[in-house]
Amino acid sequence: MLGGLAVAAVLAGGASYLASGSPDGLDATTLEGCTVDADGAITGGSCIAQRAADHELGGSFLADYGIKGVDNATGLAGLIGVALTFAIGLAIFWMVRRRRAAAAPEQVPVAVSAEK
């Protein structure tokens, strides 16, 4: 478990800096049919991306693969995400384990006699 956590932390914290800033396949597909300027703003045409709206949590602390108010914090945001995900998963497993232990019947030790 700790090995998996370490790998996730290295990938989220370190490899995220190697990620491309170019649009991925989904972003590129939603822009098909539109004309886009150098800033990424749609200037003409007709495409799916024209109907896109801001997400309700778009202004939150960890929105857009970064940290609000901190420049170039992709790796740190990834580490925070890994830590939060691990903590939530650990809490869920802990609660399930406690619930199962509470629901299990008590084991009464059986006395073994030395008689034959």
Image: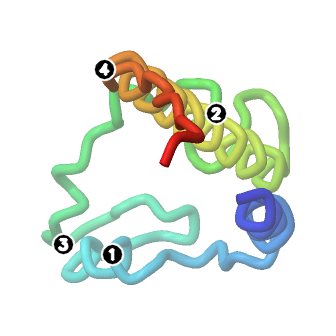
Residue placed most toward the observer, 4 or 34: 4
What is the secondary structure assignment of the residue under circle 2?
helix
Q: Are marks 3 and 1 in contact (CB under 8 Å)?
A: no
What is the secondary structure assignment of the residue under circle 1?
helix
Percent x, y of residue 83: 72, 40
Q: Select label 1 or label 4 by which is in front.
A: 4
Give the mark nearest the N terminus, 2 or 4. Answer: 2
Name the amino acid type tagged 3.
Gly
- Quadrant for residue 84, please give it: top right
Residue, disc 4: 103
Residue, disc 1: 26
Which residue is at a point 46% across and 78% down the rendered structure image?
Answer: 24
Give the mark nearest the N terminus, 3 or 2. Answer: 3
Which residue is at a point 16% across and 70% down the rendered structure image?
Answer: 47
Percent x, y of residue 54: 34, 36
* Label 2, label 4: how far apart the Cα atoms are: 24 Å
Pointer 2 local density, CA inside 10 Å: few below 14, some 14–19, many at least 20: few
Residue, disc 3: 45
Residue placed most toward the observer, 72 or 98: 98
Which residue is at a point 43% across and 59% down the rendered structure image?
Answer: 41
Pointer 3 local density, CA inside 10 Å: few below 14, some 14–19, many at least 20: few
Percent x, y of residue 34: 25, 75
Give the mark nearest the N terminus, 2 or 1. Answer: 1
Residue, disc 2: 87
* Label 3, label 1: how far apart the Cα atoms are: 18 Å
